[in-house]
Image (cartoon, helix red, strand yellow):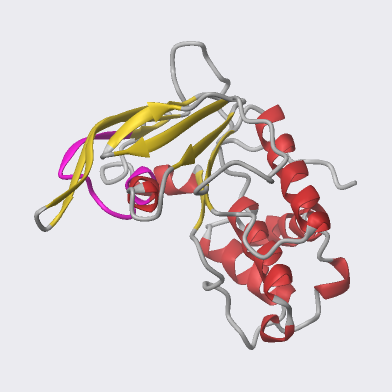
Amino acid sequence: MTAEPAAEKRVPATATAPALSLRGIRKYWGPKHVLDGVSLDLAHGELTWLGGRNGAGKTTLLRIAGGLIAPDEGDVALEGLHPERDRRAFQSRLGFLSAGNLGLYARLTVIDNLDLFAALDLIPARERPAAVARAVERFDLGELARSRTDRLSTGQRQRVRLAVAFLHNPRVVLLDEPHTSLDDEGLAVLRGAIQRHVDAGGAALWCSPTPEALHVEFDRMYRIDGGALVPEAG
């Protein structure tokens, strides 16, 4: 297995500083109050589950946490970094997987997609081949590496999308229904990648309607209900 590089953005975990902090998040879509004062900390070295019915606000909260949209009220900080004032440093520490199966360039091969996203992630050119090789190994993409992504199955494309999310060795990964289209083998690959991530001190948030049938052990579990965050029994 390829050795993990020493990443300058890996910050030692402390008991007092969460990896990601959301405080008093409120969001309105027109007259609808989607999120009503949600506060959540993602701890270093932990996997957290976020659930709730369709339309409850899970994806909205993930997008706010990832700095993709701004809350109407409240604060977001990733290892003390603000999503706007410290945008480049914030994004360099963040891995984000959106729901669905979009985001890849159909006519590019798996390797070419990963190399392109490595450049977009601002990984130095000399480090990109090693970063791509680690992603290929971690998500078991070796046999698919030279295939165009529009010729892959939806489950295979999902593994490529996951590889992109973890490609730059982020500190925090936000995963919106990462298990979508994955078979048992793909789920095992995903669980292994997340386990390595949290073992290295990273934080992960797994968003899905329900936790059943995932066969994943979560450190903490929450559900959005009526715009509020409610602890869920494990």
Where residue 129 sits: x, y (%)?
75, 62
Picture layout, residue 203 above or below residue 165? above
Q: Position of residue 217 (x, y in %)?
A: 68, 31
* Residue at point 86%, 47% (across, down): 2
Q: Decide: is 230 above or below 114.
A: above
Q: Residue at image x 69%, y 60%? A: 128
Q: Was residue 70 drawn as part of the magenta stretch in this picture?
A: yes
Q: Residue furthest top?
A: 15
* Residue at figure coordinates x 26%, y 39% from the top left: 227
Read off the magenta span: 63-76
Task: Judge from the rendering whether residue 103 lies leftward or rightward of residue 144; answer left or right.
Answer: left
Q: Residue at x 64, y 38 (%)?
A: 7
Q: Nearer the viewer, residue 132 or 30?
A: 30
Q: How many numbered badges does the structure rendering display?
A: 0
- Does 59 appear above or below 198? below
Q: Nearer the viewer, residue 125 or 142?
A: 142
Residue 118 visible in the current orientation: yes
In this rendered view, identify the residue nearer to me: 172 or 7: 172
Q: Nearer the viewer, residue 35 or 170?
A: 35
- Residue 75 as seen in the image, left or right of residue 153: left
Location of residue 108 by image quarter: bottom right
**Residue 24 in magenta stretch:** no
Quadrant location of the C terminus in the rendered image: top right
Residue 174 visible, this orientation: no
Q: Position of residue 158 (x, y in %)?
A: 66, 65
- Tell me residue 138's x, y (percent): 79, 52
Where, by quadrant of the figure, is residue 72 drawn?
top left
Left or right? Give the position of 195 relative to 31: right
